[in-house]
């Protein structure tokens, strides 16, 4: 619904834009990168969500079952803005050790975290005029990589990618008892704009690139 939410008056940012490498709190070298809207990204993300721990599902997502996950991801990859995190040597090491391989699966990235912005519109090409729409944020990190700073890197780089693409208004819902997530969103500039019995709605206005 266009213009239905209240947004902060002052924009937040600037935020870093992928690609970038970093070390998490466990000293694991990771790489954050923007994804293309292609079959390779869809398949790699499907593999990640098949490994997602059911106890970490929130508000009914991500779904379970490989085919259900793929159907859920298809519109996110096709119409959204996607950023993911993988081990820094993932894929690169496989390619270096087997330069003659024809097996594309050997080089597929092994993602451990994913963040996406989804537009509030049925426009078939929302990325052509991104400032016209509000974009909903969702972020997921595999259990073994949680509480290590991966979510912060994902969030900041997704917002940086969004601002670079001309997106101005981003919102999300978070369960009211999820204190760590709320604290993270507030740190980067999200403000609470609505509250229901179980969920809190938060929003941010992005600072565009000069």
Image (cartoon, rainbow, N blue to C red):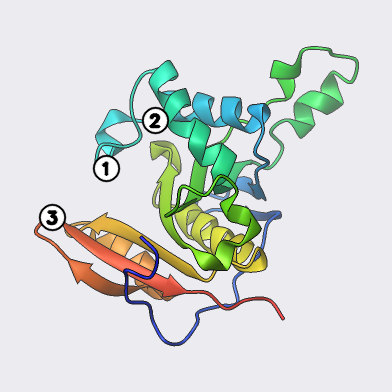
Instruction: Give the SS element for disc 1.
Output: loop
Give the label, 1 or 2, closer to the camera: 1
Q: Are marks 1 and 3 in contact (CB under 8 Å)?
A: no
Left or right: 140, with 195 as reference point: right
Label drawn at residue 52: 2
Question: Residue 180, percent across and down?
Answer: 29, 61
Examine the rendered structure and indicate whether residue 160 appears above or below residue 207: above
* Residue at 42 percent of width and 25 percent of height: 69
Mark 1 burial class by Cα count in 10 Å: few <14, some 14-19, many 20+: few
Which badge, 1 or 2, is on the more N-terminal residue? 2
Give the label, 3 or 2, closer to the camera: 3
Question: Quadrant of residue 198 in the image?
Answer: bottom left
- Between marks 1 and 3, how big is the CA–CA gap? 12 Å
Which badge, 1 or 3, is on the more N-terminal residue? 1
Which badge, 3 or 2, is on the more N-terminal residue? 2
Label drawn at residue 198: 3
Closer to the camera, 38 or 65? Answer: 38
Examine the rendered structure and indicate whether residue 64 appears above or below residue 116: above
* Residue at 56 percent of width and 68 percent of height: 131
Left or right: 75, with 38 as reference point: left
Residue occupying the far front of the picture: 123
Q: Mark 1 points at which residue?
A: 58
Left or right: 70, with 177 as reference point: right
């Amino acid at each position: 619904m266009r213009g239905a939410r209240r947004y902060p008056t002052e924009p937040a940012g600037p935020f870093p834009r992928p690609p970038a490498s970093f070390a998490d709190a466990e000293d694991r070298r990771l790489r954050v990168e923007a994804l293309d809207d292609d079959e390779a990204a869809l398949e790699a993300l499907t593999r990640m969500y098949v490994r997602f721990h059911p106890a970490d599902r929130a508000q009914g997502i991500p779904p379970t079952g490989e085919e259900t996950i793929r159907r859920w991801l298809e519109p996110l990859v096709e119409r959204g803005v996607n950023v993911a995190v993988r081990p820094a040597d993932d894929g690169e090491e496989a390619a270096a050790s087997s330069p003659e391989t024809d097996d594309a699966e050997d080089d597929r990235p092994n993602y451990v975290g994913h963040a996406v912005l989804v537009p509030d519109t049925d426009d078939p090409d929302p990325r052509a005029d991104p400032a016209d729409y509000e974009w909903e944020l969702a972020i997921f990190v595999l259990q073994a990589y949680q509480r290590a700073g991966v979510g912060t890197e994902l969030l900041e780089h997704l917002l940086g990618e969004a601002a670079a693409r001309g997106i101005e208004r981003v919102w999300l819902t978070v369960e009211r008892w999820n204190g760590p997530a709320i604290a993270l969103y507030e740190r980067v500039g999200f403000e609470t704009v609505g509250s229901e019995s179980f969920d809190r709605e938060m929003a941010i206005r992005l600072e565009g690139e000069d």
